[in-house]
Image (cartoon, rainbow, N blue to C red):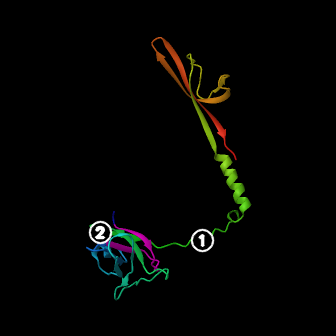
């Protein structure tokens, strides 16, 4: 297992640099405003420590005196700022946690009308959904006139097949006393509900 952040409850919506380290008895968490500060361990904004090692350990941070950006809870009902995972002896890691982004509401009418959504989705599915039925056929003779793109008919009363397919490959296989044609055909079948 390696040190990692598993959950976040910090209200300040800015990029944070979080330094996780093994303190000898728990996972240490330190909050910085830049990568350089986190590496040099200068200008610490807040810090805290988990209660031992394990998964999803809750850490409540204490703001450093004179912190430029003190931390606060995003959701007050939780008593932790961050949850971390780590084991004794894990290497120190620095994570950059980017700010969250608010996205604009989608206001186009096609996204609000269920009949339009269903009609458009059905049209897309029907336009792009098909199955390729591929057959590899060995002929009992050599037919050099078969070209890729030709239509091949396959009849079998024993298997109850009467099918047309398009030739996609034609190989001539030879032995010292015979030549055979092997063809690969594809038939496309549209799938609709």
**Which quarter of the picture shows residue 186?**
top right
Q: Which residue occupies the foreground of this view, 185 or 6? A: 6
Marked residue nearer the N-terminal end (2 or 1): 2
Marking on residue 104: 1
Marking on residue 19: none
Describe residue 98's horizontal placement relative to residue 21 as left or right.
right
**Which quarter of the picture shows residue 29?**
bottom left
Which residue sits furthest bottom?
66
Q: Position of residue 102 (x, y in %)?
A: 55, 73
Q: Secondary structure at mark 2?
A: loop
Q: Nearer the viewer, mark 2 or mark 1?
A: 2
Q: Quadrant of the N terminus?
A: bottom left
Q: Is residue 10 a member of the stretch shown in magenta?
A: yes
Within-10-Å neighbours for mark 2: few <14, some 14–19, many 20+? some
Q: Position of residue 175 (x, y in %)?
A: 46, 15
Q: Is residue 189 above or below residue 119?
A: above
Describe residue 152's horizontal placement relative to residue 176 as left or right.
right
Residue at figure coordinates x 59%, y 25% from the top left: 147
Q: Position of residue 129 (x, y in %)?
A: 64, 45
Q: Is residue 90 above or below residue 168?
A: below
Which residue sits furthest right?
115
Q: Secondary structure at mark 1?
A: loop
Q: Tell me how far mark 2 sits from mark 1, CA to CA.
A: 38 Å
Q: Is residue 113 a member of the stretch shown in magenta?
A: no
Residue at figure coordinates x 57%, y 71% from the top left: 103
Marking on residue 92: 2
Residue at figure coordinates x 70%, y 51% from the top left: 123
Range of residues picked out in magenta: 3-20
Q: Position of residue 30 (x, y in %)?
A: 34, 77
Describe residue 26's horizontal placement relative to residue 69 as left or right.
left
Within-10-Å neighbours for mark 1: few <14, some 14–19, many 20+? few
């Amino acid at each position: 297992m390696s040190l990692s952040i598993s959950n976040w409850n910090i209200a300040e919506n800015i990029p944070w640099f979080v330094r996780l380290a093994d303190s000898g008895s728990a996972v240490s968490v330190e909050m910085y405003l830049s990568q350089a500060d986190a590496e040099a361990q200068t200008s610490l904004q807040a810090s805290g420590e988990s209660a031992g090692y394990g998964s999803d350990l809750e850490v409540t941070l204490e703001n450093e005196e004179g912190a430029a950006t003190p931390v606060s809870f995003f959701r007050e009902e939780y008593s932790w700022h961050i949850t971390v995972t780590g084991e004794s002896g894990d290497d120190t890691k620095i994570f950059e946690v980017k700010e969250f982004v608010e996205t604009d509401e989608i206001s186009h009418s096609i996204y609000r009308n269920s009949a339009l959504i269903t009609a458009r989705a059905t049209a897309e599915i029907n336009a792009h959904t098909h199955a390729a039925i591929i057959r590899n056929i060995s002929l009992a003779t050599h037919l050099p006139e078969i070209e890729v793109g030709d239509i091949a008919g396959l009849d079998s009363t024993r298997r109850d097949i009467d099918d047309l397919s398009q030739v996609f490959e034609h190989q001539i296989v030879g032995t010292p006393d015979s030549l055979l044609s092997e063809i690969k055909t594809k038939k496309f079948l549209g799938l609709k509900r």
